[in-house]
Image (cartoon, grey):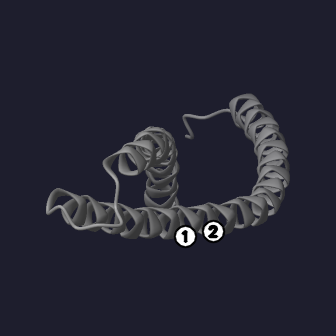
Amino acid sequence: MPTVTHAVMHHDHRQWLSEHDMWRCDIAAWQEELKKAVTDLKQIESALQEHGRVLQVHATAVRLRGQELATHEHALAVCAQGETGVELTSLAQVHDKEAATHTQQSSAHERIKRHHHAVMAQVRVLQKTVATPMQ
């Protein structure tokens, strides 16, 4: 004789069908979220490309700044050797401007660095999460 009655089986089926209805609602919501996420990823990709452009501009500015510093250092060495044509007063004025420029570039570099690290950390988290199988 079965240990489960018709009433128990009927109750189980109603419960299971109710859960299936909730699961279908969950899946529909997840599909909409995924659709939006794909759209968002296109915007993120565009933002990452802009991020790369900003990094390139910064890299160029740092390289040029290094060349300017080398040129000024050479002029300072020429002045220290007493060669004509280069005055210490002129070099001091350039040096003051260089100090201000260096401070600005240092601040910009730190802002870019913090932003870059934050973005890359989130990319790594997302990559690791999506690489994990759902089943």
- Residue 126 vs 7, above or below: the answer is below
What residue would you read off at disc 1? 56
Say whether residue 22 is left or right of residue 48. right
Q: Is residue 33 visible?
A: yes
- Residue type beneath disc 1: Gln
What residue would you read off at disc 2? 53
Neighbourhood count class around disc 2 (C-alpha, 10 Å): few under 14, some 14–19, many 20 upward: few
Residue at screen point 38% across, 70% down: 67
Say whether residue 91 is left or right of residue 134. left
Contact check, label 1 and label 2, Cβ < 8 Å:
yes
Q: Position of residue 41 (x, y in %)?
A: 72, 61
Neighbourhood count class around disc 1 (C-alpha, 10 Å): few under 14, some 14–19, many 20 upward: few
Say whether residue 80 is left or right of residue 12. left
Q: Position of residue 23 (x, y in %)?
A: 76, 44
Residue at screen point 75% across, 33% down: 15
Q: Is residue 135 visible?
A: no
Q: Position of residue 30 (x, y in %)?
A: 77, 50
- Residue type beneath disc 2: Arg
Helix, strand or loop at label 2? It is helix
Residue at screen point 51% across, 70% down: 60
Q: Quadrant of residue 37?
A: bottom right
Which residue occupies the extreme left position in the image?
Answer: 81
Q: Quadrant of residue 19?
A: top right
- Residue 70 vs 34, above or below: the answer is below
Q: Position of residue 52 (x, y in %)?
A: 58, 67
Q: Quadrant of the N terminus?
A: top right
- Residue 2 vs 41, above or below: the answer is above
Q: Nearer the viewer, residue 35 or 7?
A: 35
